[in-house]
Image (tube, helix red, strand yellow):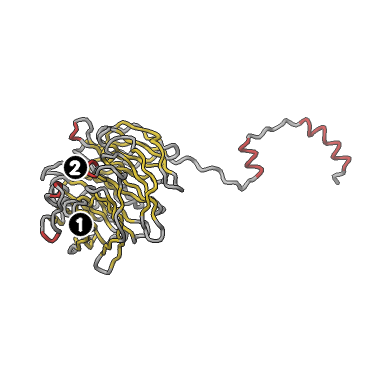
Amino acid sequence: MFTRRRFLLTLPALAALPRVVLQPAQAQSLSNPFRKQPPAPPPPTFVYLGTDTDKGVAKGIYLSHFDVSTGHLTQPSLVAETLRPSYLALSPSAPDVPRRLYAVNAVADPSATVTSFAIDPASGALRQLNRVTSAGAGPCYISLDATGESAFVANYVGSTIATYRVQPDGSLSEPVVRLDYKQSRFGKRGPNVRQDVPHPHSVHLSPDNRFLLVNDLGSDAISVFTVDPATARLGPPALFTNDRPGSGPRHIAFHPNGRWVYSINELDSTIDRFLWTTTSSQGLLVIAGPPVKTIAPGFRVAKNTAAEVAISDDGGFLYASNRGEDTLVVFTISPTDGALSFMQRIPCGGKTPRHFTLDPSGRWLLCGNQDSATVTILRRDKYTGRLAGPVQTVALDSVMFTMFA
């Protein structure tokens, strides 16, 4: 039996035991054994950068590592020497299937090509798989369908689009479909001097992977095709316009709800908002309100060309870039009807922000500044959508594209 007298007799022995000093983390763990330990910091993320090799300095595709916890980008290193990779695309993620990278080689010549690469998952190094014709001069955009079975290319200079089958090894087939946008069914030329011929500027898949949307800067129109990913075949086009000749549709972004589409117009620096609906055989775009300007009041339209558009994963904010004004602009998106309201305009930290991208965590924005030979990293507040910075500027000549992988 353990009595009070026996307890008092054991006190001297307890006092003689060595003292154990707990570190704060240990004490916290003992005080609450069910407390979750902080997660390990995420590993660096690959960032691929496409450059303009016509300038005589940059050589092709560069690779950096991005630290999501600090927003720090390492100095880029060349991983693929290839002509003018102005736009890149990744194959979809799939278990036990290595990812592929695809690049247009945007030379203003009918001999222009598209190049496919295998990605080393450990180092991010690129190994060329093959190179095929882009089926037109000046390819400016490439995308893959959600299954990774088909690829699509827009040729800005050559006024064409082309489709491809993705082979089992990730290489591209020769073009399956080649469409000439100079055909009358794709609309009439706009009044701007840059609209002398059609200029397909983007080929974008709908969220359900059933339709291909093509922005034609030269004809002020968006054409919509049905898609068969297994064969890379397209159905007949349906044509939609914003009824503003001279606007110059460039790129589009779908809202995460799949019902709203935003098209940025290069020539008049505006953004159009469309309602997107589908039937069993057709995708439909309906103008949902007046356009919004991307440039500040009083800034001359002729001195600016709008470039990129992106929407945050939560669907609350839209981002756009201006070349000339050299800014990034932020809009809030109404959760009821998708209407845009201006919130912020911030310098991009360089010159000619041709392309930008939000990082996977949503905490950072990487902006490629083509004419100042820099990549700038801006901090993003996930709750307010606002940008701050740049927090880092990395040197790289003639950056045309930035992509996380």
- Residue at 23% from the left image edge and 63% from the top image edge: 226
| Mark 2: amino acid | Asn
In the rendered view, would you say 271 is above or below 238? above
Instruction: Kindly indicate the quadrant of the structure image that contains residue 366.
Output: top left
Where in the figure is residue 319, as x and y percent of width and height? 35, 47
Circle 1 — which element?
strand
Q: Which residue is drawn at 61% across and 48% down?
A: 34
- Residue named by callout 1: 221
Q: Would residue 144 be found to the left or right of residue 196 on screen?
A: right
The amino acid at mark 1 is: Ala
Towards the viewer: 306 or 373:
306
Residue lying farthest to the bottom in this orientation = 280
- Among the 4 quarters of the image, the one containing residue 210: bottom left
The answer to whether 123 appears left or right of 132 in the picture is right
Label 2, label 1: how many angstroms apart (C-alpha)?
A: 25 Å
For label 2, count other residues whose C-alpha is less than 10 Å away and answer few (under 14), some (14-19) or many (20+): many
The residue pinned by badge 2 equals: 105
**Closer to the N terminus: mark 2 or mark 1?**
2
Q: Where is residue 392 drawn, in percent x and y?
A: 38, 33
Residue 133 visible somewhere in the drawing? no
Q: What percent of the width, then of the height, locates residue 333?
A: 38, 54
> Secondary structure beneath disc 2?
strand
Q: Which residue reaches farthest right?
A: 5
Between 285 and 341, the one lying in front of the other is 341
Give the camera-side residue of 213 and 148: 213
Please rate how many residues cluster around mark 1, counting C-alpha atoms within 10 Å: few if below 14, some from 14 to 19, many from 20: many
